[in-house]
Image (tube, grey):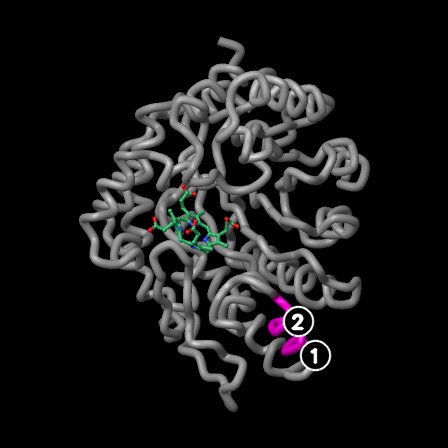
Amino acid sequence: MPSDVPKLLRVLNGERIDPPPIWIMRQAGRYLPEYRELRTRAKSFLDFCYSPSLATEAVMQPLRRFPLDAAILFSDILVVPDALGRKVWFVEGEGPRLEPLIGEESWRFDDPAKAVQRLAPVYETVERIKGQLDDGVALIGFCGGPWTVATYMLQGEGGDKDRARLAAYLRYGDVDALLATLVETSALHLQAQVKAGADCVQIFESWSQDLTKPLFDRLIIKPTAALVARLRQLGVTAPIIGFPRGSGAQLGRYAHETGVTGLGVDYQTPAAFAREHAPAGMPLQGNLDPQLLVAGGKFLEQGVQHVLEAFKNGPHIFNLGHGITPQATPENVAELVRLVKGA
Ligand code: CP3
């Protein structure tokens, strides 16, 4: 690949680059004082997500501070249920809330193609960001994994996933139909992001833990493989990073059977385990402990060295093993980027 191609895309094409490109999961957000200020300009978090000017500004904030190799669209995985006609709201300090599907007798959702039309402001945001990025900085689009989004829709909140898992048994056909709706909507949503200028996409499957093998196959692998296949059928050739957080011993099957281009590795999974179980040469992304951006100092330094060392035998994108926390300090993030870039 020509060397003016963003480093992130070169690694996703199978190249090993030293030092590796770096971006930070949830790099725009509350650990930045300028984000907290910006956030006060919208009434609700969803209003913020649907404002192309505010969302674009949120994306640019971390890039002004740190020489990161990628920008990620500012939005949320829960715009998809919102667009499908389910009520979604965010409770300050607690997290997202939805009307739970569990308890409702019949489940009806709007048509995926119509749902995606409602997300037009998100695609306008992608276009605006693309217009502002330097050439070497890749733009990442995203969606939630079908099961992760379904879990929020079923329970109406995060937390203990037991009720969602029970529904996967007791409302077998309904849950499969919900996943099929999410696969189609997410495919159209990602296609529109790529059309608007995203260079690659990430599927955040934040809740792939605590599943038996048969459930992991049915709720994670099958819908993700269907999503990847549908995207390819729609003509989307952009690389796809899958991040099945907490998948543990099932990580290798996810990497082999879903068709994703690159694999996000959570912080409790050893790099050597991911390398051993993923297809040979698959680009891996991860996996610094986000708490090290709170702890800082020698802990951060040792943590960064460990991650660099552990992943250096193949294509690697430096990242956290889960999202940055509001308690992280911008100074520690600056130090992280310095340490990775060897400056
Ligand atoms: O820089 C970025 O990555 C920002 C874009 C982004 C957000 N959410 C903004 C956000 C992305 C990629 C997400 C993904 C997301 N959203 C996931 C997958 C990643 C993960 O962390 O596992 C999930 C599970 C969600 C659902 C969600 N949205 C939760 C659980 C919360 C509350 C968490 C919290 O920290 O309060 C949100 C709200 C949210 N999404 C915030 C941001 C910046 C904080 C709300 C605010 O700023 O008012």
Rendered image quadrant of residue 322 = top right
Disc 1 versus disc 2: distance between alpha carbons?
7 Å
Span of residues in magenta: 161-169
Q: Depth check: 240 or 84 in front?
A: 84
Relative to 312, say whether 79 is above or below. below
Residue that label 2 marks: 165
Residue that label 1 marks: 169
Q: Secondary structure at mark 1?
A: helix
Residue 184 seen by the camera:
no
Relative to 70, say whether 112 is above or below. below
Q: Depth check: 27 or 297 in front?
A: 297
Discs 1, 2 touching: Cβ within 8 Å: yes
In the rendered view of the protein, which quadrant contains the N terminus? top right
Residue 200 seen by the camera:
yes
Magenta-highlighted stretch: main secondary structure? helix
Q: Amino acid at mark 2?
A: Arg
Relative to 260, say whether 330 is above or below. above
| Residue 116 located left or right of residue 275 | left
x then y, percent, for residue 158: 52, 62
